[in-house]
Image: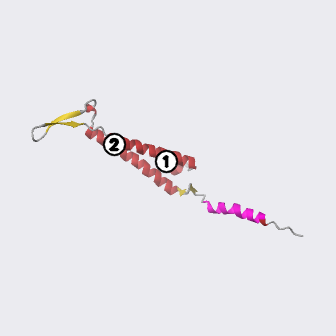
Amino acid sequence: MRISRPWLAALALACALPAQAADPTAVDGHEEAWWRAAIASRESRVASSERAVGECAEREAPPAYDGIGGLVKQRRDGRFQVVEIRRCDDERDALEAARADLERFEDGARRAGVPPGWLR
């Protein structure tokens, strides 16, 4: 007499399905190309923000203006006007936000198990 074990076949099938559905070349649902593009765009944003801060500091707030709140300029109509020196705060805030975004992304990728080579 033969004893049938249908539960064993169902268990084997249930264990095999997730293995087939999972993509071994993907981490957290994304492949290597996606991770590389995502990190590259964030690094590019940081580099762009660094350039913007440097250009603004050179153009609007050179070191010679440290400690000076503004300048007095004579307008075309002969009146004097106080012009506040721009300190590039918006650009510095954007740089700080871009760096924080990059750091959060790298930390999330590390926690997700992304191989380090995918982020280089």
Is 11 placed above or below 88 here?
A: below
Q: Where residue 51 appears, x then y in whole percent?
A: 34, 44
Confirm whether the magenta stretch covers residue 19: yes
Residue drawn at (53%, 57%) of the image: 30
Q: Which residues are magenta?
A: 7-22
Could you tell me the amino acid type at mark 1? Phe
Q: Position of residue 6 (x, y in %)?
A: 78, 67
Question: Which SS does the magenta portion mostly show?
Answer: helix
Task: Name the disc covering residue 52, or none.
Answer: none
Element class at badge 2: helix
**Residue 10 at x, y = what percent?**
74, 65
- Image spot of residue 21 (x, y percent): 62, 62
Above/below status of 111 relative to 33: above
Between marks 2 and 1, how big is the CA–CA gap? 22 Å
Residue that label 1 marks: 105
Q: Residue furthest right?
A: 1
Q: Residue placed farthest to the top in the image?
A: 67
Quick one: label 2 or label 1, which is nearer the N terminus?
Answer: 2
Query: Left of 60 or right of it: where is 108?
Result: right
**Residue annotated with mark 2:** 90
Quadrant of the drawing holding the N terminus: bottom right
Crowding around mark 1 (Cα neighbors within 10 Å: few <14, some 14 to 19, many 20+) is some
Q: Is residue 54 magenta?
A: no
**Kind of residue indicated by mark 2:** Asp
14 horizontally vs 39: left or right: right
